Amino acid sequence: CAASAKWKNLFLTGLFGWWGFPWGLFITPLYIGKNLYGLMFPTPSEQPSAELREHVRTNLMAHVLEQQQAEPSNQNE
């Protein structure tokens, strides 16, 4: 579940994020805020994101091209 993963990340960031001196003192509050924002305003999960659709489209096209290159040419028959 995404919500439980976000709670876990929030807890771990609050517990261990401060130890990264000197940047942990500045970055940790930002990530805690980001995690809280994600918990309060979750993204809708009915539709895949544009990034996921583009990633799948690119990988599918690469797979199709690999298969076409691997097949012997039957044009001379």
Image (cartoon, helix red, strand yellow):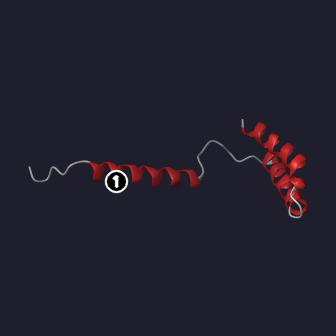
Q: Give the image location of residue 35, x and y in percent.
A: 81, 50
The residue sitting at 86% across, 43% down in the picture is 11
Front position in the image: 44 or 64: 64
Q: Give the image location of residue 77, x and y in percent.
A: 8, 49
Q: Give the image location of residue 61, x and y in percent.
A: 40, 53
The residue sitting at 86% across, 52% down in the picture is 17
Q: Give the image location of residue 12, x and y in percent.
A: 84, 44
Kindly identify which residue carries mark 1: 65
> Does residue 64 appear to the left or right of 24 in the view shown?
left
Task: Give the class, few, some or many, for how many residues have Cα within 10 Å of label 1's Cα (few <14, many ≥20).
Answer: few
> Does residue 11 appear to the left or right of 69 in the view shown?
right
As helix, strand or loop, the secondary structure at mark 1 comes to: helix
Quarter placement of the N terminus: top right
The residue sitting at 49% across, 49% down in the picture is 56
Disc 1 residue type (three-letter): Leu
The residue sitting at 58% across, 47% down in the picture is 48
Identify whether 44 is placed above or below 54. above
